[in-house]
Amino acid sequence: MSGIVELKANKLNTQEFIEQKAAEISSAVGKGAAINALSGGVDSSAVTMLGHKALGERLKTFFINNGLMRENEPEQIVALFKKMGVDVQVVDAQEKFFSALKGISDPEEKREAITQTFYKDVFGKLVKESGAKYLLQGTILTDVDETVAGIKRQHNVFEQLGIDPQETFGYKIIEPLVQLRKDGVRKVAAALGLPEVLFKRMPFPGPALAARVIGEVTPEKINIVRKATSIAEKQLSSSGAFQYMAILHQDRVTGMRDGKRDFGLQIEIRCWDSLDARRATPTRLPWDTLDKLSSQIINDVPGVVSVTYNIASKPPSTMEAV
Ligand code: XMP
């Protein structure tokens, strides 16, 4: 669909792939410097290691704290990479993202606001300050496919949409993983020596928890979905599922607390079985598991009176709600 040749995970020679991509990065960047943003997902983690293998200290890695990440995520990721000898600088951009998202409830406009804030405002400035002409990015083939098909604009896809990053943002983008899907990236990440917590890490979208808040994204709503996410991730970690998440709905429903009406919040849980995120079916979770999830979310997340479990497959559903 995009003209990019897919490299299937079962045909992938990871060592050859790593050597070839490291050489390509070195020759593209030459004696200059490059920069990349690490989110801690398997894609950006693999790119970070690959880039450091190719460029060493000439690759500057940043963790952009957009305020939309999960509990303690920035600290955990920085600590993991420090152990592997990679220095990651955290950039606090929370206010910028929340002010860009203010008043926006349309899903595509939310994604666009995050993209613009990330690439133009926060990252554009970092690139200018660093003098780097190249940005290394962990775009994978599924991101490209879904964007080109018009299903969901992935925040990291430009060229295929006819956007020239050099012209628009002032830097070139190198995408070493663009021929792979998630299963291929996991193999490469393992071969790069990343720990299992990283190469087996559950996917998490670029727009982060903003992809899981229906309607306007505010710091308060992110706090609520962050708490529910933390509970869902802990309770479903042994489910063997591909991905699981909590979503905060916009509509309120009548509940009751202390004998009075509590027109409260709704959390939806999604838990997916999937190979590569192109198709997915809801995991057949035991009722007991669902029951425990619901009790803890109702008890520990303020204002929630309803917890539902999604039973629709992708397609026509998508995995994230926004
Ligand atoms: P959907 O919701 O499109 O998700 O069925 C498929 C997979 O992609 C992840 N996802 C994203 N990843 N940037 C990303 O890097 C994004 O904008 C994005 N949107 C969805 C999602 O978590 C799932 O694994």
Image (cartoon, rainbow, N blue to C red):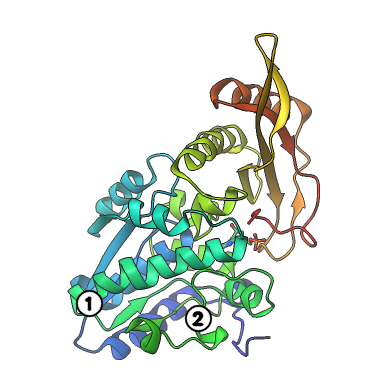
Vertically, is 11 above or below 199? below
- Locate residue 266, reporting x and y percent: 67, 35
Which residue is pictured at 64% across the width and 68% down the height? 152
Quadrant for residue 166, please give it.
bottom left
Which residue is pictured at 80% across the width and 61% down the height? 316
Quadrant for residue 231, please give it.
top right
- Locate residue 168, reporting x and y percent: 39, 84
Ligand 1 shows up in the quarter that is bottom right
- Locate residue 11, reporting x and y percent: 61, 77
Task: Characterize the local packing of mark 2: few (<14), some (14-19) or many (20 or more) Cα atoms within 10 angstroms.
Answer: some
Query: Is the CB of the residue bearing disc 2 within 8 angstroms of ligand 1?
Result: no
**SS at circle 1:** helix
Task: Characterize the local packing of mark 1: few (<14), some (14-19) or many (20 or more) Cα atoms within 10 angstroms.
Answer: few
Which residue is pictured at 54% across the width and 25% down the height? 302
Distance CA(mark 1)–CA(mark 2)? 20 Å
Which residue is pictured at 61% across the width and 44% down the height? 245
Q: Specify the amino acid type for callout 1.
A: Lys
**Residue under circle 2?**
158
**SS at circle 2:** loop
Q: Quadrant of the C terminus?
A: bottom right
Report whether 36 appears left or right of 302: left
Vertically, is 125 above or below 241? below
Q: Quadrant of the N terminus?
A: bottom right
- In this view, the residue in front, 209 or 263, is 263
**Residue under circle 1?**
128
Q: Specify the amino acid type for callout 2.
A: Phe
- In this view, the residue in front, 219 or 238, is 219
**Does the rendering let one see residue 160?**
yes
Q: Looking at the image, is mark 1 or mark 2 earlier in the sequence?
A: 1
